[in-house]
Image: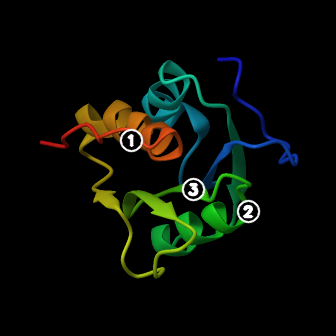
Amino acid sequence: MEGSNTVIDNRPSVKVFYDCDHLSEADFVSVLLGIEEEGIPYDVQAEHCSSVLELAHNASLNSRLGVGVGISKEGVVLQHEKLDKAAPLFKIKLYQTELFRKIGANAARLVKKMPFKVLD
């Protein structure tokens, strides 16, 4: 995956912050594939934080595109910098792995201003 990167740089990209105390990048590779398939770059950063809402909010604020994904044992959250931290665009449980690729694609589609894929 060309977008995979553990060093946060200043290029326009979707930021993906995850709880490194409970997860590894291998646990959510499908999220990254969903972003990559839509042609949008991403950066991954490990954090010592278990709040998925906090991770997603911080990721969106650190993204020059304003789009962030947070991943923890609580689940996966897609967030935009202009939304309230407690009201993300999408939130799924960690066991809903069949939706990981779609939520990644939706992060990229948010950047491209395209309709979202349905999470069902």
Q: Is residue 35 above or below residue 94?
A: above
> At which x and y percent is residue 109?
43, 38
Rounded to the nearest angstrom, the CA distance separating label 3 from label 1 is: 11 Å
Q: Secondary structure at mark 1?
A: helix
Point out the tag, 2 or 3, that comes first from the N-terminus. Answer: 2
- Identify which amino acid the numbered label 2 is placed on: Asn
Q: Residues within 10 Å of mark 1 (few under 14, many from 20)?
A: many
In contact (CB < 8 Å): disc 2 and disc 3 = yes
Residue type of the residue flagged with mark 3? Gly
Q: Residue at x 47, y 72 (%)?
A: 53
Please tell me the numbered disc located at residue 68.
3
- The percent coordinates of residue 80 (x first, y second) are 51, 63
Q: Which residue is mark 2?
A: 62
Q: Which residue is mark 1?
A: 106
Q: Which mark is residue 74?
A: none
Image quadrant occupied by the C terminus: top left
**Cα separation between marks 2 and 3:** 8 Å
Amino acid on which the number 1 mark rests in the picture: Asn
Residue at 66% in and 52% down: 65
Residue 23 position in % (x across, y down): 54, 48
Q: Earlier in the sequence, mark 3 or mark 1?
A: 3
